[in-house]
Amino acid sequence: MGLEPQGEELRRAVKWISEQRSENSTLDPIRLIESACLKFDLSPRDEEFLLRFIKEAKDRKPTADA
């Protein structure tokens, strides 16, 4: 079961982070989250959500070893 963002600004931040990562997969996810928090005026709770979101996305990503 995936994480579901609550609130319009948080949904926009998730979309923005996903777009940024699809354009450039080498971007540091932590810096993206920091930028999104500033860009979308997110709370510390929202930042925690984004950290979990990135971790889940990373955990779902298939590895070359599999």
Image (cartoon, grey):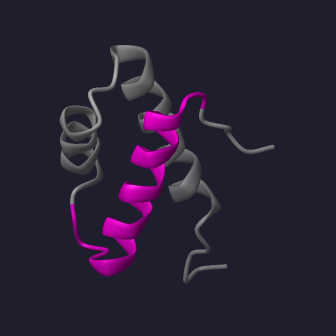
Q: Quadrant of the N terminus?
A: top right
Task: Write the residue at 31% across / 67% down.
Answer: 20
Q: Nearer the viewer, residue 47 or 55?
A: 47
Can you tell which quarter of the image residue 5 is in? top right
Picture coordinates of residue 14 (x, y %)? Answer: 46, 49
Please state the total of marks drawn on the protein image.
0
Position above or below: 1 against 65: above
Q: Residue furthest front?
A: 8
> What range of the chain is rendered magenta?
6-27
Position above or below: 18 against 10: below
Tell whether 52 sits left or right of 35.
Answer: right
Q: Is residue 31 magenta?
A: no
Task: Write the residue at 42% across / 36% down.
Answer: 51
Picture coordinates of residue 41 (x, y %)? Answer: 26, 27
Tell whether 30 sits left or right of 48.
Answer: left
Q: Is residue 12 magenta?
A: yes
Position above or below: 8 against 58: above
Q: Nearer the viewer, residue 60 or 42?
A: 42
Can you tell which quarter of the image residue 17 is in? bottom left
Tell whether 5 sits left or right of 36.
Answer: right
Picture coordinates of residue 61 (x, y %)? Answer: 58, 68
Position above or below: 61 against 17: below
Task: Write the residue at 33% across / 25% down.
Answer: 42
Can you tell which quarter of the image residue 3 is in? top right
Q: Residue furthest bottom?
A: 64
The secondary structure that most of the magenta stretch takes on is helix
Q: Residue furthest top?
A: 44
Picture coordinates of residue 13 (x, y %)? Answer: 40, 45
Task: Write the residue at 51% across / 57% down.
Answer: 58
Q: Quadrant of the C terminus?
A: bottom right
